[in-house]
């Protein structure tokens, strides 16, 4: 069996540099918390540069910070005799009622964390940016693309300029064809995926405006965005697109949508009434 990451850190501790030891000390003292931190947050928490954290991970034998976080999550889960496949601290022995309460609490906590992170000026800036845009492309990868598609669908009920683009190749093509008056609304929980970075760099080079919805406002993707909207909910590497994380993004989407609509409430009401009338023909 592969060595536990915490054992690896302990065994090689005295081979680390002074700065790397600061990171090791923080990780060893905060097992559970570390798996939820971005590389920027871990660097800040341990008082070192991001480059030091990267070197620390490679010195331990990991290809990068994501691989290191996964190892932390696996080790922490084994330590709790719980593989973290379920959210809300659900246990195998829980009754259905107890499980439901725990999941409810996890979803409510995600909403509360997002509410605390909402910055009104950024919501207003994002809705103004989207209102001025010629067209708005909604994108993401994996589970985040589901959020992007839902966002495009929601906004399409009041405006015809929002379009989802799902495939990573199509996203690059679409980004390369953006104009300066266009906008890109991107969903990425981590804000640190390769496909996202490539697409945002292309859109940025084209002069298009970028709104990023992410858990990590200091992520690489955030550095390329004009406006960053932070959602709550701590999601570890083993949670794999958890429902609380989606609940947090949906809530933030609803806030953004509502602020967008009230910028021209009468027009949005008229458009929504027209859409509702058209959809009425779809019902029996």
Image (cartoon, grey):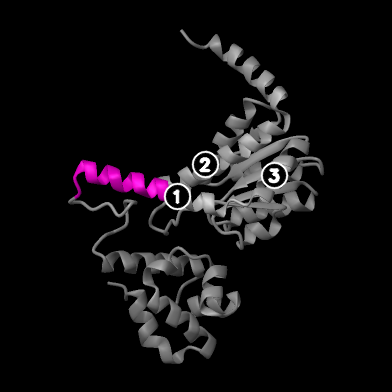
Q: Are marks 2 and 1 in contact (CB under 8 Å)?
A: yes
Q: CA distance from mark 3 to mark 2?
A: 16 Å
Mark toward the start of the polypeptide (2 vs 1): 1
Q: Residues within 10 Å of mark 2 (few under 14, many from 20)?
A: some
Q: Residue at x 32, y 74 (%)?
A: 4
The answer to which image quadrant residue 25 occupies is bottom left
Q: Residue at x 45, y 77 (%)?
A: 61
Of the 4 image quadrants, the one containing the N terminus is: bottom left
Q: CA distance from mark 3 to mark 1?
A: 22 Å
Where residue 7 sits: x, y (%)? 33, 80
The answer to which image quadrant residue 60 occupies is bottom left
Nearest the viewer among 2 and 233 is: 233
- The part of the chain drawn in magenta is 94-110
Q: Would you say residue 101 sits in the magenta stretch?
A: yes
Assign a secondary structure to mark 2. helix
Disc on res. 21: none
Q: Would you say residue 173 sits in the magenta stretch?
A: no
Mark 2, residue position: 251
Question: Residue 60, can we see it?
Answer: no
Where residue 232 sits: x, y (%)? 50, 53
The answer to which image quadrant residue 124 occupies is top right
Nearest the viewer among 259 and 42 is: 259
Disc on res. 124: 3
Where residue 274 sits: x, y (%)? 65, 15
Q: CA distance from mark 2 to mark 1?
A: 9 Å
Mark 1, residue position: 110
Mark toward the start of the polypeptide (3 vs 1): 1
Mark toward the start of the polypeptide (3 vs 2): 3
Assign a secondary structure to mark 1. helix
């Amino acid at each position: 069996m592969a060595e536990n990451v915490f054992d690896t850190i302990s065994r090689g501790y005295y081979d680390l540099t002074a700065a790397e030891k600061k990171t090791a000390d923080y990780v060893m003292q905060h097992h559970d918390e570390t798996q939820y931190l971005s590389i920027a947050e871990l660097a800040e928490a341990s008082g070192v540069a991001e480059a030091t954290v990267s070197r620390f991970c490679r010195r331990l034998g990991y290809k990068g910070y994501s691989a290191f976080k996964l190892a932390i999550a696996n080790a922490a889960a084994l330590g709790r005799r719980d593989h973290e496949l379920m959210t809300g601290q659900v246990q195998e022995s829980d009754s259905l009622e107890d499980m439901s309460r725990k999941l409810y609490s996890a979803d409510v906590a995600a909403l509360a964390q997002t509410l605390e992170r909402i910055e009104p000026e950024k919501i207003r800036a994002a809705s103004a940016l989207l209102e001025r845009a010629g067209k708005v492309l909604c994108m993401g990868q994996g589970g985040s693309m589901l959020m992007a598609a839902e966002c495009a669908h929601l906004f399409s009920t009041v405006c015809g300029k929002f379009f989802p683009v799902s495939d990573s190749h199509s996203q690059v093509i679409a980004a390369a064809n953006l104009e300066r008056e266009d906008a890109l609304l991107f969903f990425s929980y981590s804000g640190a995926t390769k496909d996202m970075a490539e697409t945002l760099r292309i859109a940025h080079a084209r002069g298009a405006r970028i709104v990023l919805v992410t858990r990590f406002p200091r992520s690489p993707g955030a550095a390329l965005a004009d406006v960053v909207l932070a959602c709550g909910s701590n999601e570890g590497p083993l949670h794999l697109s958890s429902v609380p994380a989606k609940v947090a993004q949906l809530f933030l989407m609803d806030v953004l949508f509502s602020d967008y609509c009230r910028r021209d409430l009468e027009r949005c009401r008229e458009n929504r009434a027209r859409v509702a009338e058209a959809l009425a023909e779809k019902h029996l």
